[in-house]
Image: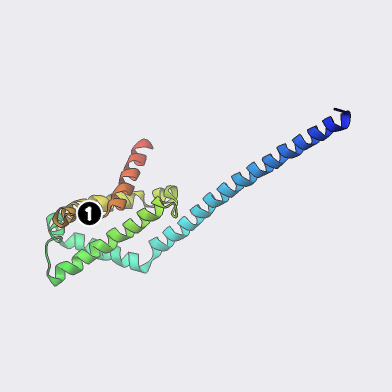
Amino acid sequence: MNRYEYLSIIVNSIYTFFTLLILCLAYIQYKYSIKVSRIKSSLEFLERESSSQELRQIRIDYANLRATLNKDEIIGLVEKRDEKSNKQREVIFALLNRYEYMAIGIDLRVIDYGTFYRLWKSTTLRDWSNTKEFIQNLRSKSGNNLYMVEFEKLVARIAVDKMNKK
């Protein structure tokens, strides 16, 4: 091999190295931009969710329900079928379904878990604590153990993370 062939090999190696370096940097930038985009869209979604008039009304209705009924009466709503009980049950389901949708969004990585955790952890744990027995009774009476499982998995994850951060 002559000097020019060695030089050509060196130049091609340098070119290949920088090409790979640029590809690695582009991949890192791509992953970072996806993460930033997910966090930004999560913040926008959770802000809309927090300020939503519909959610605010659900929370007011749920607070009124908890103020007028004791825990056993709320749990008993699973079995009652009169019009008043149906409306009260709808309030609970409206709240639980919101959490179920958010949990699915987090599981699918559409909603950033870290952002959700910082903004909603206390409210989520409190609402789970207040509705857990209702959900268990619902599962028991219907024979369907799949009601609100995404919400339950989210709560378990939050509880573990909260314990680990102490």
Secondary structure of the residue carrying tag 1 is helix
Give the residue at x 57% y 51%: 33
Residue 96 in the image: x percent, y percent? 28, 58
Name the image quarter holding the N terminus: top right
* Residue corresponding to mark 1: 131
Tell me if residue 166 can be seen: no
**Residue 96 position (above or below residue 162):** below
Considering every residue shown, the one lying at the far right of the view is 3
**Residue 151 position (above or below residue 11):** below
Amino acid under disc 1: Thr
Give the residue at x 36% y 36%: 164
The structure's colour scheme is: rainbow
Q: Is residue 30 left or right of residue 97?
A: right
Considering every residue shown, the one lying at the far top of the view is 1
Residue 2 in the image: x percent, y percent? 88, 28
Q: How many numbered dots are placed on residues in this image?
A: 1
Residue 60: quarter of image: bottom left
Tell me if mark 1 has few (under 14), some (14-19) or many (20+) residues whose alpha carbon lies within 10 angstroms of its own. Answer: some
Considering every residue shown, the one lying at the far bottom of the view is 83
Considering every residue shown, the one lying at the far front of the view is 1
Give the residue at x 15% y 72%: 83
Residue 72 in the image: x percent, y percent? 12, 55
Name the image quarter holding the C terminus: top left
Residue 21 in the image: x percent, y percent? 68, 40
Tell me if residue 103 can be seen: yes
Q: Is residue 157 left or right of residue 2?
A: left
Residue 76: quarter of image: bottom left
